[in-house]
Amino acid sequence: MQDDEVLAEFRDSKALLEGHFLLSSGRHSAHYLQCARVLMDPERASRLAMALAAKLPRDIRKAITKVISPAMGGVIIGHEMGRALGVEAMFVERPEGTFGLRRGFAIEPGDKVLMVEDVVTTGLSSREAIKAIEEAGGEVIAAAALVDRSAGEVDLGVPFFPLIALSLPTYAAAELPPELAASEAVKPGSRAKP
């Protein structure tokens, strides 16, 4: 799947929003990718996951024994990646602030894990999820995401494979351009303000 085809999926599902947004990272942006919207159509979610799985090098793809994603944003794409790769999919969640496995999910000794996110901006959630997976005994051999918003800057400590990399500028609150500073930020994501 080419970049223009991926963006068409976001546009067709009205998942590429414009305005003034406060991202989960605490940064501001004039664009927001509402991955929940692009993934709410099971056929579209499956197509995107298959395209993302195809981006993984064959040796990594063959080694993966589990897919784990951070809740909430990564749950659907994580499940679809599990289907695309033919392995179990689980998620870590943080009901009390720190990611961990719950709901009877368990990692077996020797499990090679692919950590999957919807969107990576600063990589904070991804690194926290990787840490929780490793603390539970998994070996994270790679990370993947539908969208890399970091402009190629993120370092997750493992090989990282996004379906598409977008350079949509983000700003600290003190650096807002006038057009964003003139409007109130909307917080469309699922995480509380930092």
Image (tube, helix red, strand yellow):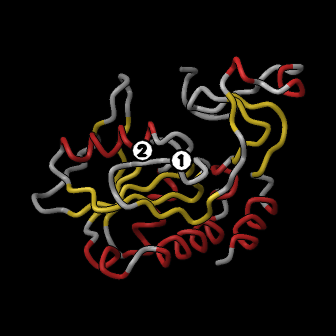
Mark toward the start of the polypeptide (1 vs 2): 1
Q: Residue at x 43, y 56 (%)?
A: 116
Quickly name the residue at label 2.
126
Q: Specify the quadrant of the image occupied by residue 142.
A: bottom left
**With respect to residue 43, does 26 lie above or below?**
above
| Crowding at mark 2 (Cα within 10 Å: few <14, some 14-19, many 20+) | many
Given the current orientation, which residue lies at the most extreme left position?
Answer: 109
| Crowding at mark 1 (Cα within 10 Å: few <14, some 14-19, many 20+) | many
Q: Position of residue 56 (x, y in %)?
A: 43, 74
Q: Quadrant of the N terminus?
A: bottom right
**Which is more toward the observer, 183 or 40?**
183
Label 1 element class: strand
Q: Position of residue 34 (x, y in %)?
A: 69, 47
Residue type, numbered disc 1: Val
Q: Specify the quadrant of the image occupied by residue 31.
A: top right
Q: Is residue 26 left or right of residue 33?
A: left
**Which is more toward the observer, 63 or 15?**
63
Q: Residue at x 63, y 72 (%)?
A: 43
**Which is more toward the observer, 158 or 133?**
158
Residue type, numbered disc 2: Ser
**With respect to residue 101, does 63 lie above or below?**
below
Q: Does the residue at mark 1 contact the one at mark 2 (Cβ under 8 Å)?
A: yes
Return the mark for residue 42: none
**With respect to residue 176, does 75 lie above or below?**
below
Q: Position of residue 65 (x, y in %)?
A: 25, 68
Q: Residue at x 61, y 49 (%)?
A: 149
Q: CA distance from mark 1 to mark 2?
A: 7 Å
Q: Position of residue 15 (x, y in %)?
A: 75, 52
**Which is more toward the observer, 108 or 53?**
53
Quickly name the residue at label 1.
120
